[in-house]
Image: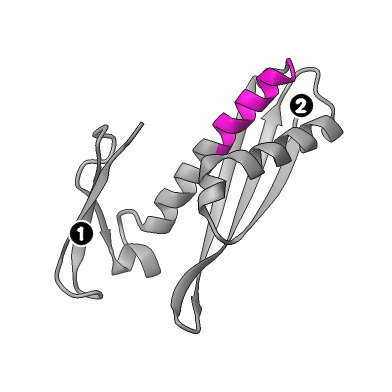
Amino acid sequence: MKRTASAQWQGGLKDGKGTVSTQSGVLSKTQYSFGTRFEDGVGTNPEELLGAAHAGCFTMALSLILGEAKLTATQMDTTAEVTLEQVADGFAITSVHLTLRAKIPGADQAKFAELAAKAKAGCPVSKLFKTEITLDAALVS
């Protein structure tokens, strides 16, 4: 399976602007710029898109793992906080923190924490990152 996305850019780093698009069309010429990445501009940025991909991938992986344990979530809400920092040789993603709140009938906190940790380690997007990935997973009623 292969999926594609594309980016277009015009101009310099700080005064330029670009768009990103996905094969599915969900993103179509979505604006991004220096302002959307390092300030509060309107549009998206690479870290936000990586966060969305990681949150989605992790949550789907956990759904699979829960099913293998004969559990089904009625609700899972995941947020991925991607940290971009200046380092000695430029910029780097230095961490990703996943926050998950889930309703899973029949699950206890210990088993849930074990399964969530397994999903964090096994999700393909987690495997892509070469940085610290932390997880705060809690069951909610």
Q: Position of residue 84 (x, y in %)?
A: 49, 67
User: How far apart in space, not on screen, are marks 1 and 2 (Cα)?
Assistant: 43 Å
Q: Upstream in the sequence, badge 1 or badge 2?
A: 1
Assess whether residue 67 is covered by the magenta stretch. Answer: yes
**Amino acid type of the residue tagged 2 in the rendering:** Ser
Q: What secondary structure do most residues of the magenta stretch adopt?
A: helix
**Amino acid type of the residue tagged 1 in the rendering:** Gly
Q: Residue at x 64, y 19 (%)?
A: 74
Compared with residue 2, is residue 81 higher up or lower down, i.e. above or below? below
Q: Residue at x 48, y 49 (%)?
A: 51
88 or 74, nearer to the observer? 88
Q: Residue furthest front?
A: 1
Q: How is the image coloured?
A: one colour
Q: Which residue is mark 2?
A: 141
Q: Which residue is mark 1?
A: 18
| Quadrant that contains the C terminus | top right
Q: Report the magenta residues as a range.
A: 58-70
